[in-house]
DNA sequence: ATGAAAGCGCTAACAA
DNA sequence: TTGTTAGCGCTTTCAT
C-alpha cells in the first residue's frame, strides 16, 4: 500500500541506506561502491519500482526542483504560449512548473509569492504587477533566482526579458501615417506601467515627427477590470464620436479583439478609409477579413531567454559562492517587436 | 538569512514548539492553550514574518496541498481556460496547481505522472491520452483522488466529466441538412479515442436519418502531429477535389482554425453555397466574416464540475475510512454541448 | 568499500 | 495547560 522507501530497498539488498542513496544519486562511482552491489541494488530498485520521495529529498537538500510562474492570466494566449515553452524546457532539466494568475492584483500576487515561498520553489518567473517591487527585492535578497518578463521594473536590478514597446507602436504609427492616415486613434488600458506608457509614447512620437498633433478625443483608456459590456460601450462611443478616425491602434491583444467585436456590432467597416492595428499576434488577426496588421512580440524568444537565464542562475546557485561567481550580475534583455503588415 | 523556523518562534516566546504548532494549526482552542500565550505567539509570528515550511509539513502529514494537472497542451485555449478556472477554485481552498502538457504522448504522460507521484501531489486532474488507463488505475489503487475530463475511458470506474460528443455533431449536421446542405464534409484528427469516434458517429447518424449516404471522399483525417504545411496541403486537396461540398464540419477547434486559413489561402468563399461549422468556441469564430457556427463545449461548467468533484474527494480522504465513506463510488458527469448558430 | 547516525522543519501521540 | 520526543524519507558527514 505505502510506497517503498529507500529503507525497504536497503533491507532487501542487505546494504545500508547510505549505499542505496549513493547509488541513486550517481555517487556510487565516486564512493567506489563495487559493481556487484550497484547492479544488485539497481535490479531491486527496478523490480520494486522504487521512486525516491521528492518531498523528503527537498526537505533535506533545500531544493524542490520546482519553478514558480506568475502571470497575469494563464488563459491569455500570450501567457499560455509562453508558459508552454517554458514548461518544455524546464521539463527537460527535471524542473516542474507551478503556475498562478495574478489578475494584475498586487495583493493576490503577494499572496501567491508567499505560497511559493512556503513551498520552497527554487526560482521565480514573474510577469510583475505594479507594487510588487519590494517582494521581488526580498526574493533576491534571499538569494533566489528571479526573472521578470513582459514588464520591466525601473530601478530594480533583476534579470529581465522585455520587448521594446516604444519601437513597436512607433513603427506601426509611422507606417499608418506614411500611408496617408491623419486621424489615428489609440486604445489602451488604464494600467500605469512603463510598458503601456512606452506604447503610448511610441504612438505620440511618431505623430510628432510627422507634425501631427496628438488629439485627445481619439485616445481612450479602458479600465483594466471593465466588463465586456462597458468596454464595448466605451469603444462604440469612441468610434461613433469620431467618424473622421481613419485608423486605430490597440495597445493589447484582448483590447483589439474586443474592439473588432465592437466594430462588427456597430457595423463600421474596415477598408481603405479605416483600418485597425493590433498588439500581439493572434489567429483572430490572421483570419480576419480584412486581415489585421499587428505589432508582434517574439513569444518563442521571450520564453527561451527567460528560461535560459533562469536555468543558468539555478546552476550558479548549486556551485554557488564556492566558485566565486558574481551572483549579482543581472541580465537585461530587450527584444524587438516585429510590425507585421497585412 | 535562513528563514525562521517554528523553533525560533518557540524560543522567542519561551514556549515549546508544540505550543506553536498547535497555534499555527488552529488547534489551540482544542488544546486549551491560554489566550495570553496564543496572543503572544501570534504577535511574534507576525513580527518575525514566520511562514511554516510547507515541505516539512508535507513530509510529516503526507499531503502537499498540490494538485497535478495533465492536459494535452496548456497553450490550447480550451485547456488554458479550464486550467484558469480550476486554478481559481483550487486557490481558494489552499491548493496549488502543477501543470504539464502531455502532447498526446503516452510515454510523456506516464513520465509526468511519475514525477507527480514522487512529488506526492494530493490529487490528479487528467485529460487522458490513449494507453494511460493502467496508470490511472494504479493511482486509484493507491487511494489518490483522480478526475478525468475531456476524454472518457470506457471500462474504467473513475470520476469523469465529459461532453456528449455524439450529440454535438449530430445537431450540427442535422441543422446543416435541414438548411438544404447535401454534401457535408467532415475533418477530424487521427487520434483513436471514443470522443473522436463519437463526433464522427453523430455526423454519420444525422446523415443516415436523412437518407444521405456517407461519402468517404468528403471525409479526411489529419494526423495529430501533422505540420501546418502538411495540414494545409491536405485540406486544400479536400476542398479542391470536392467542389460540390456545400458545408464542412471540423471536429476540433484548432483544425477549424487551420481550415479557415486554408480556405482563405485558396480563396474559397463562405456564402449561401458553402459554410463552415467548428468545434469549441473561439474568438476567431465569433469575429470571422462571415461568423462561424460552432458546437460549443461548456468550458466553465467542465472546470467547475471537475474541481468540485476533486475537492469533494479530497475532503473524503481526510476523514477517510474512519467515517466509513465509500470511496469507490465514482461520479460520471456528461455535459451537453450547445450548437451556436451564427 | 560500506555503515551509523544526525538532522532538514514539522506534527502529534504521550507525559507531566 | 504545556513540554518531550519520535519519526516522516532522505542526504551526507564521519567512522570503520
Image (cartoon, coloured by chain):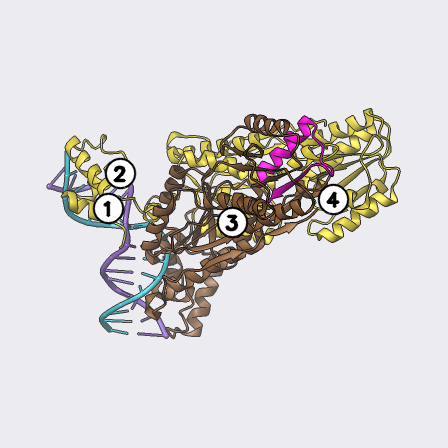
Chain colours: A brown, B yellow, C purple, D cyan
Q: Is residue B324 above or below residue B238?
A: above
- Distance of mark 1 from mark 4, alpha carbons? 60 Å
Residue A16 in sight: no
Which label was assigned to residue B113? 3
Disc 2 and disc 1 in contact, CB within 8 angstroms: yes
- Most foreground residue, B206 or A119: A119
Binning the other alpha carbons within 10 Å of mark 2 as few (below 14), some (14 to 19) or many (20 upward) gives some
Q: Residue furthest front?
A: A211
- Residue that label 4 marks: B261
Mark sitting earlier along the chain (1/3) = 1
Residue under label 1, please give it.
Answer: B6
Give whichever of discs 4 and 3 has the lower sequence position. 3
- Residue for badge 2: B24
Residue at image coords 74%, 47%? B222
- Chain hosting mark 1: B
**Mark 3 or mark 2, whichever is nearer to me:** 2
Amino acid at each position: 500500500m505505502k510506497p517503498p522507501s529507500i529503507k525497504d530497498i536497503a533491507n532487501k539488498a542487505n546494504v545500508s541506506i547510505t549505499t542505496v542513496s549513493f547509488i541513486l544519486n550517481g555517487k556510487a562511482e565516486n564512493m567506489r561502491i563495487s559493481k556487484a552491489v550497484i547492479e544488485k541494488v539497481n535490479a531491486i530498485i527496478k523490480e520494486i519500482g522504487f521512486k525516491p520521495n521528492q518531498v523528503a529529498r527537498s526537505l533535506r537538500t533545500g531544493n524542490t526542483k520546482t519553478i514558480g510562474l506568475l502571470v497575469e492570466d494563464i488563459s491569455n494566449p500570450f501567457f499560455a504560449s509562453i508558459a508552454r515553452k517554458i514548461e518544455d524546457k524546464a521539463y527537460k532539466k527535471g524542473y516542474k512548473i507551478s503556475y498562478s494568475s495574478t489578475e494584475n492584483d498586487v495583493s493576490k500576487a503577494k499572496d501567491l509569492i508567499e505560497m511559493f515561498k512556503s513551498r520552497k520553489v527554487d526560482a521565480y518567473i514573474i510577469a510583475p504587477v505594479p507594487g510588487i517591487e519590494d517582494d521581488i527585492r526580498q526574493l533576491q535578497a534571499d538569494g533566489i533566482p528571479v526573472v521578470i518578463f513582459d514588464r520591466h521594473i525601473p530601478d530594480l536590478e533583476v534579470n529581465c526579458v522585455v520587448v521594446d514597446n516604444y519601437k513597436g507602436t512607433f513603427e506601426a504609427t509611422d507606417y499608418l501615417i506614411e500611408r496617408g492616415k491623419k486621424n489615428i486613434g489609440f486604445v489602451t488600458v488604464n494600467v500605469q506601467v512603463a510598458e503601456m506608457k512606452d506604447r503610448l509614447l511610441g504612438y505620440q512620437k511618431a505623430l510628432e515627427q510627422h507634425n501631427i498633433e496628438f488629439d485627445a478625443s481619439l485616445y481612450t483608456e479602458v479600465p483594466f477590470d471593465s466588463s465586456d459590456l462597458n468596454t464595448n460601450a466605451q469603444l462604440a462611443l469612441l468610434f461613433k464620436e469620431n467618424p473622421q478616425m481613419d485608423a486605430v491602434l490597440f495597445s493589447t491583444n484582448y483590447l483589439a479583439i474586443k474592439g473588432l467585436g465592437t466594430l462588427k456590432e456597430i457595423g463600421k467597416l474596415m477598408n481603405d478609409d479605416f483600418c485597425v492595428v493590433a498588439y500581439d499576434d493572434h489567429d483572430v488577426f490572421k483570419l480576419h477579413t480584412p486581415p489585421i496588421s499587428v505589432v508582434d512580440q517574439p513569444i518563442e524568444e521571450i520564453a527561451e531567454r527567460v528560461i535560459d537565464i533562469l536555468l543558468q542562475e539555478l546552476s550558479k546557485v548549486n556551485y554557488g559562492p564556492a566558485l566565486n561567481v558574481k551572483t549579482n550580475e543581472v541580465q537585461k534583455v530587450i527584444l524587438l517587436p516585429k510590425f507585421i503588415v497585412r
